[in-house]
Image (cartoon, rainbow, N blue to C red):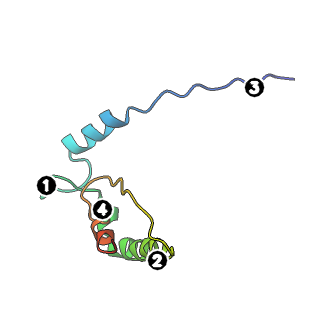
Amino acid sequence: MKEATKKIKKPWPTRAVMEQVYELRLWGDEKTEFYSGSGSHQLDIVKPYIAAVISFLTSFKTPISVCDLGCGDFNVGKELVSIY
């Protein structure tokens, strides 16, 4: 029987990658300093997502605490602030 060898994953240098994304403006446009990419601005994606999240967050009898660890311009997160 062949013994399985465990692969050792190298950590992804997330900070360096994200710094490069912002420095080179790989996401977004030249109009704003921060931009999450096109997905956070496509209403056909964003509206149903926000509706689902608001429905979930408001479904609890006792309000829950939430921390949004967004990735850019707060375009989606800002829609959730009003429910708190």
Q: Earlier in the sequence, mark 1 or mark 3?
A: 3
In the rendered structure, which amino acid carries the disc numbered 4? Ser
- Residue 4 - label: 3
Inter-mark Cα distance, 3 to 2:
45 Å
In the rendered structure, which amino acid carries the disc numbered 3? Ala
Inter-mark Cα distance, 4 to 2:
24 Å
In front: 18, or 28?
18
Inter-mark Cα distance, 4 to 3:
42 Å
**As displayed, is residue 31 above or below residue 53?**
above
Q: Residue at x 33, y 71 (%)?
A: 84
In front: 64, or 70?
64
Q: Residue at x 21, y 47 (%)?
A: 25
**As displayed, is residue 74 above or below residue 4?**
below
Please tell me whether mark 3 sits on a helix, a strand or a loop.
loop
**Tags 1 and 2 touching, CB below 8 Å:** no
Q: Tell me where residue 23 appears, x and y as whole percent.
A: 19, 41
Q: Earlier in the sequence, mark 1 or mark 2?
A: 1
Inter-mark Cα distance, 4 to 1:
13 Å
List the residue tagged with mark 2. 55
